[in-house]
Image (spheres, helix red, strand yellow):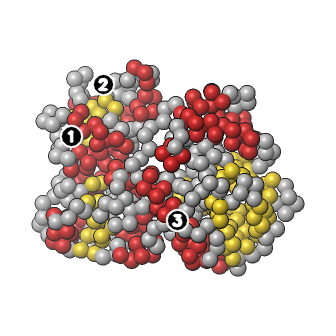
Amino acid sequence: MLIEQIYTGCLAQGAYYIESQGEAAIIDPLREITPYIKKAEKNGAQIKYIFETHFHADFVSGHLSLSNKTKAPIVFGPTAETHFESIIAKDGQHFVLGELTIVALHTPGHTIESTTYLLKDKQGKDHAIFSGDTLFLGDVGRPDLAQKAAKMTQEQLAGMLYKSLRTKIMPLADDVIVYPAHGAGSACGKNLSKETVGTLGEQKKLNYALRENMTEAEFIKEVTEGLLPPPEYFPLNVKMNKEGYEDFDAVIKRSQKEYSAEELEEIANHSDAIILDVRSQEEFAKGHIPQSIFIGLDGGFAPWAGAVIGNVEQPLLLVTPQGRQREAVTRLSRVGFDHTLGSLKGGFDTWKNSGKETDQVKSITAEEFKNSISEKTEIFDVRKPDEFTSERIPQAISTPLDFINEHLNEFPKQKEFYIYCAGGYRSMIAASILKRRGIHNLLNVELGFKGIKETGIKTTDYICPSTL
């Protein structure tokens, strides 16, 4: 028996490769399927099944492309409705994989079709669960994403999740291994652990949602409390996963075109294409194409592209570091951005050397920030609300990057102001969006709140959310 977790940090997502006696199964594959095929070929195995725990909202799955290439059937849980050929498993249905058995356990709540796959070893003993977004380490899946499709409230879905956990998951033995679909950083839960593999016994002790004697009412209240609106791209990804999408190889091939500075400028001026700069925040601050948006590859690139751009049908023109164009297109396609038109040949140096206009982001060090501000200084914190309520600059205003467009009227149009995040990455994204909106009177604090704290500046430790 071989079980391998294939974890993608940018998406905080875990796909799984299971193999026994020359037969393999893939659970929740990413869109680029070559690694799974190569792994099976190397091991002399045939991919027999592709299991989907649910219709994913935060990434485009590789189930269709993988099935087309391998002829392996796609398996979804009960109630799933697809626009392509698939096996809709019955609750408790068994799938044989070599000496192993995989049992579909219908665990609705995160979504209606959510299914946990129980792996039994050759002796028939429960070995592991692949829990999708039903059960994470430290948390459970948020119950608000499938309200429209299910025609139910988040409270009703949370009630279903409560029953799923207590009738299908918690009765299993403590030594059963838990392989979730996500870890810390995913927007599919609130309190996910940085660990990506654990045991069910550990979760029964540590996971708030699996507390012994927890009532359904308590569960519903705690699971639905503090949920932020989902990113705009989530329902678009669900639609692609249900209805189908263009083959990954075709997306890559189409996006490889390179443009001169003149050609890129012409396309940007006569279309609705956005110029997306994926270099480092330091490089972007020093110089960039006016009106371009920054989202650096060396960060949570794809989820932030989804969150701040939103519409996955948006045409994109890329400014990339040398040799990283394919990586950028690949990671964009994971969240459904299939309309990358190409990139600037030679990167930003080509633009700069052409003599065309450039722009910069004014940045200051944390020490300069400390020495420049007063009680009347306008400061904007673009971290997430829970980071803000935990600790912040006393007079800072919370304008989370996820919802920056909803806060545009709060930023001064003339007076200089400061923005910061945790380490500098998100505030540079915010700066680029504000400048694209014509707001240039900002100063970005380098190294963010981490750098600010190191200066010894006064901070507020905790603010009750009800007072905000």
Element at badge 1?
strand
In front: mark 3 or mark 1?
3
User: Of all residues shown, which one is farthest toward the right?
Assistant: 123
Q: Establish if 314 lies above or below 160.
A: below
The structure residue drawn at horizontal position 58% and vertical position 45%, both measured from the top left corner, is 110
SS category of the residue bearing label 3: loop
Compared with residue 287, is residue 144 higher up or lower down, i.e. above or below?
A: above
Q: Is residue 464 left or right of residue 219?
A: left
Which residue is under mark 2? Answer: 395
Quick check: marks 1 and 2 in contact, CB under 8 Å? no
Of the residues shown, which amino acid type is indicated by label 1?
A: Leu
- Which of the pair 98/423 is nearer the observer? 98
Give the mark nearest the N terminus, 2 or 3: 3
Choose top left, top right, bottom left or bottom right for residue 277. bottom left
Which residue is under mark 1? 442
Q: Which residue is denoted by mark 3 in the rendering? A: 83
Q: Earlier in the sequence, mark 1 or mark 2?
A: 2
Report the residue at 51% width, 48% height from top. Answer: 149
- Between residue 26 and residue 216, name the one nearer to us: 216
Is residue 24 visible to us here? yes
Q: Residues within 10 Å of mark 3 (few under 14, many from 20)?
A: few
Q: Nearer the viewer, residue 423 or 79?
A: 79
Dot 1, crowdedness within 10 Å: few (<14), some or many (≥20)?
A: many
For the residues marked 2 and 3, what is the alpha-carbon distance in whole angstroms? Answer: 52 Å
